[in-house]
Image (cartoon, grey):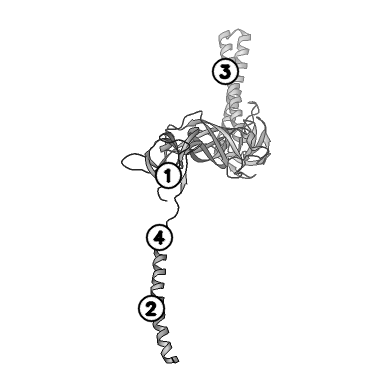
Amino acid sequence: MNTRTLLPIAVLAFLALGVPATGALLWMRSQPVEAPPVLGAPEVRDVVVKTVATGSVVPRNEVALKARVSGVLETLYVEPGDVVEAGQLIADIRVIPDSARLATARSEVREAKLRQGDAVRALQEVQGLVDQGAASANELEDAQMRVALGQQALDAARTDLAIVRDGASRSVGAVSTSVRSTVGGMVLTVPLEPGDSVIEANTFNEGTTVAEVADMNDLIYVGQVDESEVGRLSEGMDLSVTLAAWPDARLPGTLEHIAPKGIDVAGAVQFEIKAALDLGAAGDRFVRANMSANADIVLEQRTQVLTVSEAFLLSGGQGTRVEVQAGAGFEERVVELGLSDGIHAEVLGGLSPDDVLRRPDS
């Protein structure tokens, strides 16, 4: 045979054999590959159901020191971070008196002096008449009483003038222009600078805060929990607080307070909780006020119980079931479950530690 005869025969042979072979290969590759089943078994472990509350670490008692007179902050003796004792001087305030009140107070002092002078002269006249036998002892006592009352009114007017002019009277003994710490602790904030105006605390105004002082050795956790979980909480429960600054440090705590009233936060009702903290777990680290923290609160717990992974569970009209190996195949078996943490569920009945399970989707 020549080349012209062999070429068509070779092409026909390739088409007759290659096309069916290629189709068979593609068909084989299109068939699903059966993966081996995923097997498992019940295991003994702890089942813990907990909730996470977001919040912060704050001092139990934080005191705001207020000015008792209005004026200008003249001198500051502390700065944030200083440790102070109760009664220690924090700042001095220079009083800037009101012109109208100052003029009124001075006028009252002058008027009291005039009244006192008249009473003294009247007493001298009555005393002369008594010596001559022209006035009675009762008239003398009345004149002496008017002198005493006049002196008292003069002293009161002078005290009012000192308070208006200086912010306090030296006869009172307490200098209200001095701001002193009412508690011992650490100075957290000093929001003012010398020269800033301050307003006194009164029934209509809370006054200007000169400094904030708190005991940094007594900190508590303050956070919020959702209303769906607050019913499972109770005072005295243990919790573990993790600080954002040190994720590896966990501070143990005890739940002390659960708010009786919830607040609406972005459409969800939240309840405030407070817990005492053990700062010893922080070691040498200084826990600062208002540090962000998360609290893990154990709601329910089962210790060393038989559990099954929820990935092996079947749900349906016949209750919760699992596929258990029986000989060469698998059979469905109804199981009774208890507490679940969303990954593992406590087995109350229907399984033993020796059973082999098959995952339904395998």
Q: Earlier in the sequence, mark 2 or mark 4?
A: 2
As drawn, 23 above or below 78: below
Q: Secondary structure at mark 2?
A: helix
Q: CA distance from mark 2 to mark 1?
A: 51 Å
Residue 346 coordinates in the image, percent (x, y) = 45, 36
**Which amino acid type corresponds to the residue marked 1 in the rendered image?**
Phe
**Which amino acid type corresponds to the residue marked 4 in the rendered image?**
Pro
Callout 4: 10 Å neighbours few (<14), some, many (20+)? few
Q: Secondary structure at mark 1?
A: helix
Q: Which residue is mark 4?
A: 32
Residue 68 coordinates in the image, percent (x, y) = 58, 34
Q: Which residue is mark 3?
A: 146
Q: Can residue 179 be seen from the camera position used here?
A: no
Q: Which residue is mark 1?
A: 312
Q: Which residue is mark 2?
A: 16
Report whether 241 appears left or right of 36. Answer: right
Front of the two marks 3 and 4: 4
Q: Secondary structure at mark 3?
A: helix
Front of the two marks 1 and 3: 1
